[in-house]
Amino acid sequence: MSSEHVSKEDREAIAASRFSCTERERAVFESGIKMATIYHQFVGTPVNKKSVAGLEKAISQAIEVQPYVYSAKVKIDRSVFPAGKDRYSYISLTGDMMDAVVKIRLDSYEVTAEMRYDYELKYPLMYISSIEEL
């Protein structure tokens, strides 16, 4: 049967049948996929003071179209941009420049995942900050 003839409910049931874990574990898994997308799809993107707000919006919107995403907010540290305004005054996005918060809703769970640069670890840490049963 082609996917255009499968109902939304059937598609969800088919997807759910592929997982050998609880709803809670699947919600956590989904949040990890979204965090990895933010990091691995966008690190290296050229950005400057003029384009930073648009890039934040584009990353957030790209994540929000993925299944189970309730909200996605990405902020980029503006303090790292060079002072110049010429065509060479841009940098490449790095993990230590991004803060992200993604909320996943899957059945009866809401998971909040975050990415923040951890100065003690010297690492852009991705973690689950909350899991709530709805």
Image (spheres, rainbow, N blue to C red):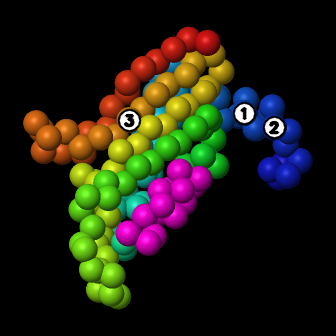
In the drawing, does residue 92 fall left or right of residue 113?
left
In the depicted structure, whether residue 42 falls above or below residue 101: below
Residue 121 part of the magenta-drawn span = no
Q: Residue furthest top?
A: 133
Mark 1 or 3 closer to N-term?
Answer: 1
Image-quadrant location for residue 90: bottom left
Q: Predominant secondary structure in magenta?
A: helix
**Residue 71 circle label:** none
The reply to whether dot 2 and dot 1 touch (C-beta < 8 Å) is yes
Mark 2 neighbour density, 10 Å: few (under 14) some (14–19) many (20 or more): few
> Who's the residue at 55% across and 22% down the image?
110
Q: Amino acid at mark 1?
A: Glu
Q: Amino acid at mark 3?
A: Glu
**Residue 12 circle label:** 1
In the depicted structure, whether residue 10 falls above or below residue 110: below
Query: What residue is shown with label 2?
Result: 8
Query: Secondary structure beneath disc 3?
Result: strand
The location of residue 65, given as percent across then percent down, is 64, 49
Query: What residue is shown with label 3?
Result: 114
Mark 1 neighbour density, 10 Å: few (under 14) some (14–19) many (20 or more): few
Query: Secondary structure beneath disc 1?
Result: helix
Q: Report the magenta residues as a range.
A: 49-62
Q: Distance from label 1 to label 3 (Cα)?
A: 26 Å
> Who's the residue at 18% across and 45% down the image?
123
